Amino acid sequence: MTEILAPTVAFAPTAVVGPSASSLEDSQGNENQISRLLEGLREAAPAAEENPNAKSVDLKFENRLAMVRLGIATSLFYSLRAKHVATAAHSLRVALSCSTWAHRLGLQESQRDRIEVAALLHDLGKIGIPDRILRKPGKLTVEEQLTMDCCSRLGCEILRGCTDDAELLDIVLHANTWFDSRRYEDGPRHDALPLGSRMLAIADAFDAMTTDHVYRSAMSRERAVQELSQSSGTQFDPELVIDFSRMLEDRPEMLHGIVADRWLKQLQGDPNTSLWTSTTNDFNEAINPNAKSESYFLNHLTGKLRDGVAFTDNEGTITRWNDAMRRVTSIAADAMLGKSWCDESIRLRERDASRQENACVVFECLRTGASVCRGMLLEKPGSSPVPVHVQVSPVISDSGTSFGSVIVIRDLSDQASLEEKVESLHHQTTRDSLTGIYNRSYFDDQLAASTKRTAEGGETFSLIICDIDHFKRVNDVHGHPAGDEALIRFASILESHSREADVVARYGGEEFLLIAANCDNATATKRAEVIRAALEQTPLPSLGGEPVTASFGVTEFQAGDSPETILARADRALLKAKDNGRNRVIQLGAGNCPSLRAETPKRGWFGFFDHGVSRQNSEVDILTPVPVDLAIEKLRGFIADHDAEIIRVTENQVSLKVNAVCTTSGRRRIDHYITLDAQLTLSEQQRNDRSGMPSRKWHGTKVHVVVRPIRNRDRRSRALHPCIAQLIASLKSYLMGEVIKDVAP
């Protein structure tokens, strides 16, 4: 530990993070630079090849973190984990992010070690926070929030007992300090804040936004980057935000990827490591050799039940939350485990208004020791309350000792649709003959139906596309029967990890797809990671007991999408996963943000003469908080997914030919197909600071969009306005921007 915390020379962030402030000012309005970046759009994307250095880089990060974990840091981190497992897991992910980032910035080893230790222990102060606040599932009061604000100071007090390294303590102390903070007039601001604190604040916020919480589902990575960019210059260092965004663009799998999963698995009791493993499990298995198998049966039972099931301990703390409970309540397990049960937190209320409003079914069961059964209502945002049947039963031993409770919630809204499906010839026409899962034809129909349903305001969905790695090598070395076994086994794993409303299909060859219904980007990515790990751990007899691996691309429906663009974006994520080393999951897309949905204008009898509406919907300004180079990278993805053609590039302007598909009107297919000319003009923008002066460190991008039909006969088509609205909504989603609706004529 002494070697890790050795003094080091101060690091000048402007020398590594990016260009200096003066160079940024000189580059403002430089149309040559924008023109050069736009010219790069003409270049074809490189072919997806396996990166031989990716695995070695991952192992390097893992080994470095292993060194940091030794010594006192291990004991303190273990104490935090004993206090609150979710906080410890969050701290580990943030430490991995900072480790990756510090390596990218080329920091000195001693400074990098110091930042990793600070990231690993930045929430150490939560050891001193009362459980009633730390485990509270609902919103904190003002007094409780003030108590949580003391975490940084409490963490420093604990660390002072084992180290006197001033730089490490400063990083932890200022981890939550805003870059342009006005709260403490005498405190450090801007570059006076430690570099590690500024990096830690960004990595901490990014992980918090991409993790499920009771009050909010996890954001997609692109939406999280958008939030970081919008808060740059105030809450976060703008130059570091840009560099962090570029790191995610270059190697998106580095954060929350294989390395993080492997370390989290070790913290949860991997038998191959002795650092975090308690002897309790070994002792229990020695006494009861069937304990492990019973655990598998229990996990399988609760995972396959259609009813929501949750377990609590004797104090009402949630210890298990099955997938059906997530589907019923729309709250993920990660957001509830370790929290105290509260009817209000999951929006569960009584049907009978005469009942006590603040009553809690779990604590009523624990207090009386009797089962509680009643009909209740479960409220979901944006929809009508769902009638449910709730049953809470106490878990009591033969000696009368109470261990907690079991909660079962049954959705009563779809009882009429629970009839068994009749087997017919339809099964033969929609199933793949080798694997038994759905075929490509059925998948295409379901993808189109899901896209239409979501575009009309229905529940969102995600698409997972997966491809077995080096499948040709399996056939060449072991023969085609071995390849068939690999396909059948992979299809079986996909089906075993699917839900009732999901669609698992074989797209062709070794490619498989999964439509994850009512599933956002973050949840779909987690599910893909589980499937990837299950396949990697499944030995195949025809391969001599060796497993196969697969690469995964994940995306969620977003505004302006068509079935073709969703599939193209997922396939682009898959190619990126293969290019970055294979056997990994890559997520792309901003997700289904309600504020970005396309709006179709209504037209009356005189709609053909309404030139104002036509201009308003064909010429807009989109303001995105990311710099020009990142905006052009997002635009590259838009061009690839929409199969757009670049017509010309002039200075800071690019013209695209886009075939837009709209299904809002007309019976003939030609009525749904309009070729549009989209003219995009890019310019660098600055945001004003709190004093009203332009901020020299925050640089966004304004994209002026003009969309017109190429064919004259399409100008009076009823499908023109919906197509333009859909195209602009899609541009907003890809650019992670907002439309400035007042466009000068």
Image (cartoon, helix red, strand yellow):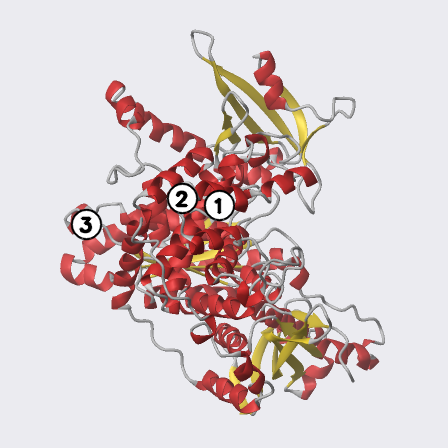
Considering only order in the chain, which callout, 3 or 1, is on the residue closer to the N terminus?
1
Considering only order in the chain, which callout, 1 or 2, is on the residue closer to the N terminus?
1
- Residue underneath mark 2: 497
Give the amino acid at mark 2.
Answer: His
The CA span between labels 2 and 3 is 21 Å
Residue 278 placement, left or right of 710: left
Give the amino acid at mark 1.
Answer: Cys
> Where residue 417 sits: x, y (%)?
59, 37
Give the amino acid at mark 3.
Answer: Glu
Quarter containing the C terminus: bottom right
The CA span between labels 2 and 1 is 44 Å
- Residue underneath mark 1: 156
The residue tagged with tag 2: helix, strand or loop? loop
The residue tagged with tag 1: helix, strand or loop? helix
- Residue underneath mark 3: 546
Residue drawn 48% across the image and 48% down it: 502
